Amino acid sequence: VVDVKGGPDEGLDRLGQTLVVQGWVRTLRVQSSVTFIEVNDGSCLSNMQCVMNSDAEGYDEVESGFIATGASVWVKGILVASQGSKQKVELQIEKLITVGRSDPSFPIQKKRVSREFLRTKAHLRPRTNTFGAVWSFVKMQSVARVRNALAYATHKFFQDNGFVWISSPIITASDCEGAGEQFCVTTLIPSSPEVTDSRVDAIPKTEDGSIDWSQDFFGKPAFLTVSGQLNAETYATALSDVYTFGPTFRAENSNTSRHLAEFWMIEPELAFADLNDDMACATAYLHWIIRVIYHFCMWKVKYVLEHCKEDMDFFNTWIEKGIINRLSDVVEKNFVQLTYTDAVELLLRADKKFEFPVKWGCDLQSEHERYITEEVFGGCPVIVRDYPKEIKAFYMRQNDDGKTVSAMDMLVPRVGELIGGSQREERLEYLEERLDTLNLNKETYWWYLDLRRYGSVPHAGFGLGFERLVQFATGIDNIRDAIPFPRTPGSAEF
Ligand code: 4AD
Ligand code: MG
């Protein structure tokens, strides 16, 4: 158990105490009289420098070369003041036990490695971590701890504000966005006991060898969910304020730094609420998140202080210089709000050439979104509302102009669209008409339509992509480094 958390300045109050550290060897330096072993147990970014003399118990393990980068060890020693400049304290080893040796082929040695390379070693990349070294990659341990803190802060925000967390299903027959970007679920049918380990062979086939889709989900079509929203709406129209927080899937073949095939989404849904309530909720939530991450001193969020201050300092110094100050400025401000029509005006007047030309009715591309928040509004998040109905999903409430819907997207610097939300169409006849116009099968939405038949209420909600939030909070530029095991087209190995 390591009790020296929170960085290299910590631990001075524990000098002279005997400690046990269990962790993984980052580096090993054998000198003639003394050996330095840097051990990390994942509790913080810093390693524990352990110093071993040749008379310490277990030194033969070092001599015989069994302790190498990657090995797991148990060390017991006394905490002493360090002579080195990098840390205030170090552990003078009395006893070392090798728990698991590491082969010299351990692929992540102390040298510059690229993020692309690390993604091919997703099972070992959380072990990349050396405090003080200027490495050109994101430290996945830090990402994991910040991600965890953001998840904690998310639940805390909604719980403290009376929202009930709903587990929405992953397997569903409904297509929330109506965009047909779903993965299909198939039931494997082993043809004989010998082939049970060959899942590809066990995908049900018809006589001509093509995939038999009638076997999908025990004979019914089923897909991975693109959003928990429709299910959240059913609970919002009974419990009032609810939220989901879970994995969602999109079969879109996009290879960008903002898209994943599997990502986590936070989806609050508020009953007796309109688009203004929705935007207020999204703003309050993001303000809270920024405070939690950058204003560590709040007593309520001591947990975050203890777990990732050092990690945030790392991002602030090495990944996106000055991000803490920039976002701290934003937290006191109300976010900019403007209509889609005004946003298009701004883009048309821009003295900048866009790759995708702009005209009223077009979907905003990432370059447009970033221009608006970064260049027009100086890094402040911007909420764009009232989009043309043609480019938005069927469930959004039609505005009185007949052309736009009560939708809102929150755009933030570097990331672009962080949040997409709307007031929902609560009027049965409008909703049915929209489904018909879009050629969506009303039969599969029968239960969703029921919500409008029985006690319909104005309600609204939004979805926030959790990995994009991690990008926003840390400055990580590629979404593949914001999730432990990224799923992108063709990549699902680990
Ligand atoms: O705008 P989207 O598609 O909206 C919905 O799914 C609604 N049902 C949400 C709701 O109102 N409850 O997605 C919402 C957010 C986006 O703003 C973005 O942050 C994220 O989800 N997102 C993705 N993140 C990573 N990879 C992808 N492929 C994403 N697609 C959407
Ligand atoms: Mg969207």
Image (cartoon, rainbow, N blue to C red):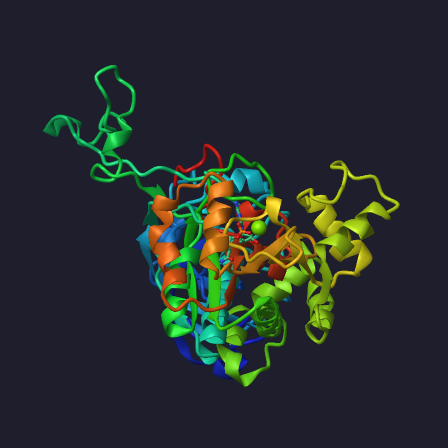
- Quarter of the image for residue 354 reads top right
In this picture, residue 146 sits left or right of residue 399: left
Q: Nearer the viewer, residue 423 or 149?
A: 423
Which residue lies at the image location 75% right of the left edge and 53% below the top edge? 341
Up-down: is 438 above or below 283? above
Image quadrant in which the N terminus is located: bottom left
- Compared with residue 61, is residue 293 higher up or lower down, i.e. above or below? below
Q: Can residue 332 be seen in the rendering of this structure?
A: yes
Q: Is residue 64 left or right of residue 90?
A: left
Tally the numbered discs.
Answer: 0
Q: Residue at x 35, y 37 (%)?
A: 184
Report whether residue 1 is seen. Answer: no
Q: In the rendered view, tell whether residue 396 sits above or below residue 358.
A: below
On the image, the x and y values in percent for residue 86 come to 62, 65
The foreground one among 172 and 54 is 172
Most distant residue in the right direction: 351
Q: Residue furthest left?
A: 193
